[in-house]
Image (cartoon, grey):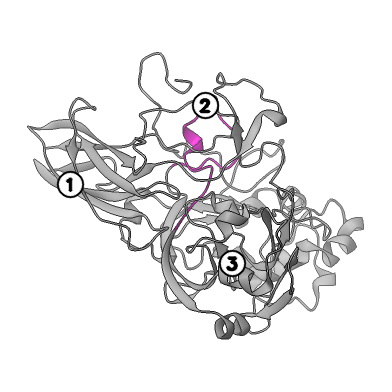
Amino acid sequence: MGNMPENGVYKLSGISPENETGGVKMSSDHPKHHKTISEFFAADPATADRDFFGRETNEDRRGFLRGAGLATMSALVGANIPFHANLPQGFLPIAMASTDVLVGKDGLTLLNDRPVNAETPPHLLDDDITPTSRHFIRNNGIPPDDIDAATWELTVDGLVNNPMTMTIADLQSKFDVVTMALLIECGGNGRSFFNPPAKGNQWTLGAVACAEWTGVRLKDVLNAVGVQNSVVYTAHVGADAHLTGDPDKLPISRGVPIAKAMTDDVLIAWGMNGNDIHPMNGAPLRLVVPGWPGSCSQKWLTRIYLRDIVHDGPKMTGSSYRVPNRAVEPGEKVENEDFVIIERMPVKSLITNPATDSASGTSMEVRGHAWSGDRTVSAVDVSIDFGATWQAASLDAPVNSGAWQNWRSNVRFPGAGYYEIWARATDSAGVMQPFAIDWNPKGYLNNTMHRVAVRVS
C-alpha cells in the first residue's frame, strides 16, 4: 500500500502545536506562523497588510480600497467604514483585532483564516445531529458582506426551457419545503496523514458534519425550469470573492452530473438546524449535496446553470478534486489527463467517544458515526487488540438518505494498560474501510480506519 511505512504502522498522529502548518497564509519570508489575525498584524504590520489584504505600498491603496480588501475589512468589523480613505498602511481596526473569525463556533481548530478553514475534533462530533456551532468550515474565497436573506436572489438558467430568478421567499412559496439530516465532508478530510505530504489544508479527521438542513429539492426547481435533453452537468456560482480581489475571478465553481442533481436528497437550503445558516457555512443560501465532496455544495449560492458538457469552472479541472485513474507511487508526478473527478465519497467511520488519550476503567461505551457516499453502511466493527479480533457494533439506520449512521459498542478491557480502539465500516456494496490507502498527489479520500488511544487503570 502506498501509505504503509516499513514498520507496518500507518501514521495517525494529529497536528500538534509544534508541527502545525495552518494559520494565516503568509509570504515565505515571514519569520513565524500565527493562528489569529491580530497576532499576524502585531508581528509584522506591513507584511500582514500585504498578505492579508493585498496592499503592497501606499501607492496601491486606492486599488485596495475599491476591491475585496475593503470588503473583507468591512465584513470583519460588521459595517461599512465611511473614512476608509484615511486608513494607514499596516492598520488593523480595533474591532477587527478583537474579532474571532470563529464566532458562533465551539471548539473548532483553525487551520487557515484567509480563507477561513476550521475543523472539529472528533470527540466534539458526538451528537447524532451536528450542532451549527460544531460544523466545520471550508471556504475557498472571501465571504460576501451583504447576506440579506430578504433581497437574496438565485438565478437558474443555461440549457433550460424557462429560466428563473427567484428570491428565497419565492423558493419557499413555489416548492415543497423539506428538512433533512445531510452529511457534508471535505474531499481533503484526512489529508494531514499522507506521506509524503500533500499540499492544501492539513485536515485531520474533523472536516465532516451532519446537520439538519431546510430548503427545497434541487430537482423540483430544475423540473420547474425545464431541463433540456442535451444537459449533462450543472454549474454552481456563489457570491464569495476571489482571494486576489479580482472581480472577474471566481474562487470556486463546481457542478455535478445531472443524474445526481435530480436525486431526492440534494437541497437548495436556507436553514440549518432550525435557524438561519451560519455565515461561514454559506448564509443565506447554499447547496447541500450529501455524500459527494463538500466542494459540490456551493455556498452563498447565486446561480445554477445547466450545461451540455462537464462543467469546467474553477476547481473543476486539472487535479482539483480529482484522483489518479490508477495506483501511483508516493511522490509520483501525475499528468492532468490521468486524473478523474471525485464523485461519491468512500466508506468511512469516526469514533466520537472516547476522545483519544482518554483514561478508562475496564469497560466503556464506544460510539461514533459511519457513512459511505450514496450508499448505506451495513456494519461497523470495533477492535481493541490491534485488529486481531473484532466485535460488531450496534448500528442505526440513517434517519433519511444522505445522513450518516450512528453506532455504539460496549467494550471490556482485560486489564490495565495501553489500548487502541479501532473502528471499521462496511457499506451496502460490501466495501470495507481499509487500514491504509494508496497515496495520491492531492491528499483526497483518506478513509483509513480511525484509531483512538485509551489508558486503562
Report helix, strand or loop for mark 3: strand
Marks 1 and 2 close (CB-CB < 8 Å) = no
User: Could you tell me residue 53's position as x and y percent?
Assistant: 75, 56
Callout 3 amino acid: Arg
Q: To which residue does mark 2 refer?
A: 439
| Label 3: few (<14), some (14–19) or many (≥20) C-alpha neighbours in 10 Å | many
Q: Nearer the viewer, residue 4 or 346?
A: 346
What separation in Å lies between label 1 and label 3 (alpha carbons)? 36 Å
Farthest residue to the right: give it.
59
Main SS, magenta residues: loop
Instruction: Classify residue 328 as left or right of residue 63.
Output: left
Q: Secondary structure at mark 1?
A: strand
Which amino acid type is shown beneath numbered disc 1?
A: Ser
Tell me the tag on residue 409.
1
**Local SS, label 2:** loop
Q: Disc 3 designates what residue?
A: 286
Q: Position of residue 420 (x, y in %)?
A: 24, 33
Residue 110 in percent (x, y) is at 51, 51
Mark toward the start of the polypeptide (1 vs 2)? 1
Which region is colored magenta? 183-204
Image point 8% across, 40% down: which residue?
362
Residue at the top extreme of this rendering: 6
